[in-house]
Amino acid sequence: MEAFELEPSSGIPERPIKGRGAVGNVPHRFSTETRRAEDDGWTPEQAPHPDTRLLPDTARSILSHNDSPDLGFDQSINPYRGCEHGCIYCYARPTHAYLGLSPGLDFETQIFHKPDAPALLREALSRPGYVCSPIALGTATDAYQPFERKAMLTRGLLEVMLETHHPVSVVTKSSLIQRDTDLWAQLASQRLAHVGISLTTLDGNLARELEPRASAPHARLAAIRRLSDAGVPVSVLVAPLIPGLNDHEMEKLLAAAREYGAAGATYTLLRLPHEVADLFRTWLDWHAPEKASRIMSVLYDLRGGRANDARFGSRMTGLGHFAELIRQRFDLACRRLGLTQDWPRLDVAAFQPPPAPSGDERQLALF
């Protein structure tokens, strides 16, 4: 990969940009220098609108594995690194630091994709020692972000899943998933599929500020309806719950998802790992200054006095009285609405390994 592709963006704005979550490029935790924008009297008042670039990811493997007890899967695929949705709270933002890029604007404007993802998956599934277990798509960044319209990497992965009868799940906040209803329905008819739709708020204005390029709430509800009507098991992920900002909507979010066909529900509280904490504080200062102190105070209480608590067992749901109140409210609403909190068990016995790729196919997968 050419060196210039990995340089953080210059011209760092310090005011909100329409259609973007971060106001600028914060230094990442591996930085040896700090950049700060200064008004020299020549820069225009309007902040620049950085273009989004799609760059190649030259990784030679496709499957990631984890042993976290907080997650309902042990292997996953992320066809994209970085996410144009620009959700200010995204816990995956710090991963761009490993590329020498900022978790701020770089994360939502410099998107890396794996053009050979379907071929790499087919190769991984054909290995003699492979043991089938459900694969989760887009666990770090959304598998249905805008570039997927043309790149069609996620669709290609689903075609491999269908060909090999491999169980698969996804969590997305994009209505683009409806494009692949045909594949999800075929997989679901064989107990090989589960879809999670992430809902943060029903307030369109708040959604545009929190998740500037993600699908609007009504579009996500429509996706739940279409997939559910096609026989695909759909759950709603109420996430992240942000005390003092959207937690009062929890019951309404669950009720709306149930009305549109969701059969299950889960939730997570806001997580602020590494650089996300400062990015979120800055976002609050711009978009909710009157609530900022209260929100951060409760979040610190939920995380044991820290901005983030990475410990298993508490990182998703928090600690203390407020966390317990959220849990009780969620449990009560799910019981009242008939929403299960367990994801469906998918069939691993039907898996049929693909034929091992030939030497020529292995060479092609490197390009």
Image (cartoon, rainbow, N blue to C red):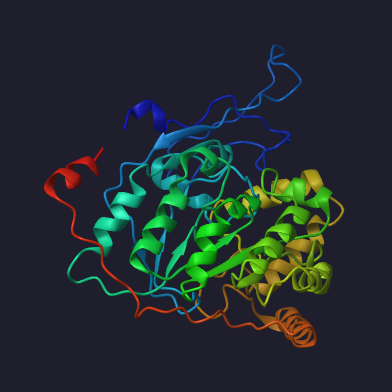
Nearer-the-camera pick, 5 or 204 = 204
At 49% from the left edge and 44% from the top edge, which residue is drawn?
28
Residue at the right extreme of this rendering: 290
Q: Quadrant of the N terminus?
A: top left
Camera-nearest residue between 361 and 270 = 361
Residue 200 at x, y percent in the picture? 72, 61
Q: Nearer the viewer, residue 300 or 123?
A: 123
Q: Quadrant of residue 86?
A: top right
Residue 301, above or below 109: below
Could one spot residue 169 in this view of the protein?
Answer: no
Residue 106's x, y, as percent? 53, 37
- Residue at (63%, 75%) from the top-left corner? 304
- Residue 12 placement, left or right of 65: right
Residue 186 pos. (x, y %): 50, 66
- Please tell me whether residue 44 is drawn above or below residue 174 in the rendered image: above
Name the image quarter holding the C terminus: top left
In-image side of 24 versus 244 (left or right): left
Query: In this rendering, is residue 66 above or below 26?
Result: below
Left or right, 272 with reference to 331: left
Tally of numbered tags:
0
Q: Is residue 144 visible?
A: yes
Q: Is residue 339 above or below residue 109?
A: below
In the image, farthest residue toward the top: 42
